[in-house]
Image (cartoon, grey):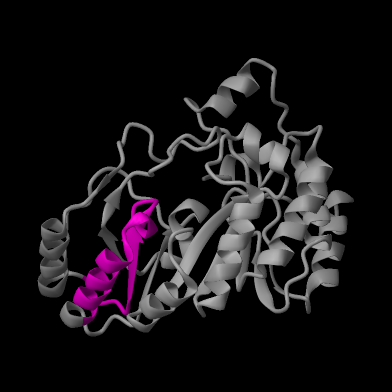
Amino acid sequence: MHLIGSVIRPPSEADSILLQVTLGCSHNACAFCGAYAGKPFRVVPEAEVDEALAYVREHGPPSRRVFLCDGDAMVLSTDRLTRLLTRIRERLPSVTRVSTYANARSLRPKSVEELTTLRGLGLHTLYMGLETGDQETLSAMNKADTVADIVAAGQKVRRAGLRLSVTVLLGLAGAARSRIHAERTGRALSEMDPHQAAALTLMLVPGTPLHADFAAGRFQLPDAPGMLAELSALLSHTHLSRGLFLANHASNFLPLSLRLPRDREKALARIDQALAGRVPLRPDRLRAL
């Protein structure tokens, strides 16, 4: 199956069938993100999606999971998503779960009842980027939604019975606002109460506005100890009813995977050990997006 341009998917969707139903991102203006640079947003016609499904049925790798690409599949109408999920069930009967990225703007017009209907047709997990719970930082990054919008959308996803995975970015507020960013992000995550939260570490991408700010001296990226201190503050302020907290992405200095609230104190102790030099950090040369 031919995929157009570079395709981004969560690490946990590594074994999923990738089905492009949109191209690019409908916002594509976040200051830190270069994922869809040079890839104008458009909705893939249904006929092309049908051709891709036919190809997967005939030639594709066996998988029980489908991930809808690119960055904004939930921008599709509920009717279009209903037809899509129905076709996936009909043509790929072995598939048991369908997941995709989502944002507050695309979720806003969809009711809890609509999302519940989509869940009944196979929609399973929505991945949302909170990035930060600090509105000042979020505005500076030119994110399309407010913190309140993102929190409300995540709560709607939970009410619909869908699995919610939320990503945040260590270092996004720079060194000066690091602590505020960490504490407010922890509080926002707690309000969303996702099934999974993932903390990635900001890596500046050439060609993005944030990289230009860094090169001009307008943005100071926290160093490794600063990132660890931020992670500690974030974790201290994140209170999930029950969920997985991951900081094991290739961008992170200290890989962590824990269950909240069970493993919080053990993880905080490990961060303290790393700050004291008793636990080795991942070298910069091995870190990646």
Return the residue nearer the eye: 130 or 250.
130
Q: Visible in this render: residue 124?
A: no
Pinpoint residue 234: horizontal percent, then vertical percent.
78, 55
User: In the image, which residues are magenta?
Assistant: 61-89
Pinpoint residue 99: horizontal percent, then vertical percent.
40, 68
Q: Residue furthest top?
A: 216
Residue 71 on the magenta segment: yes
Return the residue nearer the eye: 245 or 68.
68
Pinpoint residue 128: horizontal percent, then vertical percent.
53, 58
Q: Which residue is depicted at the point 49% across and 73% down? A: 112
Q: Is residue 282 above or below residue 197?
A: above
Residue 205 on the magenta segment: no
In screen coordinates, is 114 left or right of 32?
A: left
Return the residue nearer the eye: 254 or 12.
12
Q: Is residue 71 above or below residue 237?
A: above
In screen coordinates, is 89 left or right of 248?
A: left
Q: Which residue is depicted at the point 26% across and 57% down? A: 21
In screen coordinates, is 269 left or right of 234?
A: right
Q: Which residue is depicted at the point 69% across and 25% down? A: 219
- The quadrant in which the N terminus is found is bottom left
Return the residue nearer the eye: 109 or 211.
109
Q: Which residue is depicted at the point 83% across and 54% down? A: 233
In screen coordinates, is 87 left or right of 168?
A: left
